[in-house]
Image: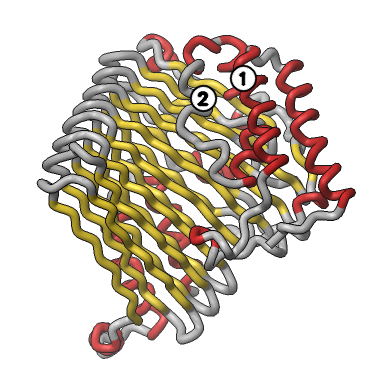
Amino acid sequence: MTTELTTDAQETLAAWPAAAIERGVRNGEPDWALAQRRAAAEVAERLPFPDRRLELWRRTDFGSLSLASLRPFAPGSRARNLDDLPPAIIERLAGGDGNLGLVVQRNSEVALEQTHPKLERQGVLLCSMERALREHPERLDGFLGSLVEVDHDRFTALSCSIRAGGAFVYVPDGVDAALPVRLFQWLDGVGAVVAPHTVIVLGRGARATVIEEQLSETLEGTSFHAGATEVFLGDEAKLVYATLQDWGRNVFHYSNQRAHLGRDAELQWVQILLGGRMTKTNSYFGLGGSGAQAFVHGFMFGDGTQHFDLHTLQRHLKDHTTSDLLIKGALKDRARSVYQGLIQVSEGAQRTDAYQANRNLLLSDRARADSIPGLEILANDVRCTHGATIGQVDEEQMFYLMARGLPRNQAQRLIVEGFFVPVLDRIPLEDVREHLRHAIEKKIG
């Protein structure tokens, strides 16, 4: 790991937060947001980079990531309309009907913000984080930075201090957002560090669908994504949220996702990991109101030498809460996945119903999957279960399909697609599901 830094490297990293604060001042950030940056920078200075001595980093090594050789705040051109966006994003949007809210970030700059009259009439706010801090600071105060623990590790503190880009989605009390919201992050800056921060707030009884996609081509030279997402659901609110990561193979991905659910709120979260060179993400869900429900589904599909590390935490803080988590993984070649999950039930969180499962499918003898589920229960009237499986493609299924005329690769593709169907069916937009099916087919070969 990068625990030992030269003096020049330390000076380079120490200069990043100061540049970020200057950038924040130019963008009109309120004093409290600038103070958050300064506090995060102080934490980053005193923390070492995580290494294998820490349990959550024991199986993942960012040692080949030389941060000091990269540059933050990679520029991105402003788009006048959809036609100015990168072709890959235009292609992703081509299958939809155009009735949506849209925020597109290119490197460290938000390139396009496009709300919709239907959303505006409902009082839904959708804009870049910079604009939100400048024009709606009162809506963000108390939300931005309140769930992501700045001292989680040095990568987290650094990300919070050099935050650039991201989006703000706000749905007022009682409003059922008429259209879905799509957020794109496009990375084409070689040697870039990007640190977007997105905040989603749903008021009491509000409803919304948000899909976030992270895309790039594979380029020469390393890039680093260090993002964060914070989700707040008011009482009886419901959010369907999908995150789809498909970076090029030159990208190191590190991210923190946090969600807090009020009374009787419901969260459906779908998390897909397909791209990147090395990925580590921490997704924590706090059920802070009685009757809250979180349904978390996702999958990882790696090939080549890709490495995915997903850590989840289901925190049951109140009584009669429910969480249901299913993470699937498929690996071929020498790819590796690490899943580490914890169900945590607080004292007094009686009648908790929690489930956690991790299913892995190995498509080669050299692929490897590590699965570490866990329970931490401080209440006595609960139902909590967890499980994990790791196995190879069933040869009887392969024989059955091949005996009916299918070539081996097509038979394997059908089995893998069937393996992922329970997660794919939860993606809220058909055109997004089709892109994912195509990506799976491409990986299978």
Amino acid type indicated by mark 1 = Ala
Gap between marks 2 and 1 measured at Cα: 8 Å
| Residue ID for mark 1 | 33
Pointers 2 and 1 in contact (C-beta within 8 Å): yes
Which residue does the image show at 80% across and 38% down from the upper left? Answer: 14
Query: Left or right of 339: which side holds 426?
Result: left
Residue count near mark 1 (Cα–Cα under 10 Å), binned few <14, some 14–19, many ≥20: some
Residue 126's place in the image compared with 408, above or below, is above
Which residue does the image show at 32% across and 18% down from the upper left? Answer: 203
Query: Which color scheme is applied?
Result: secondary structure
Residue count near mark 2 (Cα–Cα under 10 Å), binned few <14, some 14–19, many ≥20: many
Secondary structure beneath dot 1 equals helix
Residue 267's place in the image compared with 277, above or below, is above
**Can residue 231 be seen at all in this image of the molecule?**
yes
Residue 440 falls in image quadrant: bottom left
Q: What is the x, y in percent for residue 187?
A: 66, 45
**Can residue 274 be seen at all in this image of the molecule?**
no
Q: What is the x, y in percent for residue 153?
A: 58, 46
Which residue does the image show at 66% across and 31% down from the upper left? Answer: 164
Amino acid type indicated by mark 2 = Leu
Q: Residue furthest right?
A: 8
Which residue is at the front of the view, 262 or 253? 262
Query: Left or right of 385: which side holds 170?
Result: right
Secondary structure beneath dot 2 equals loop
Residue 132 falls in image quadrant: top right
Q: What is the x, y in percent for residue 259?
A: 38, 35
- Among numbered discs 2 and 1, the one appearing first in the sequence: 1
| Residue ID for mark 2 | 144
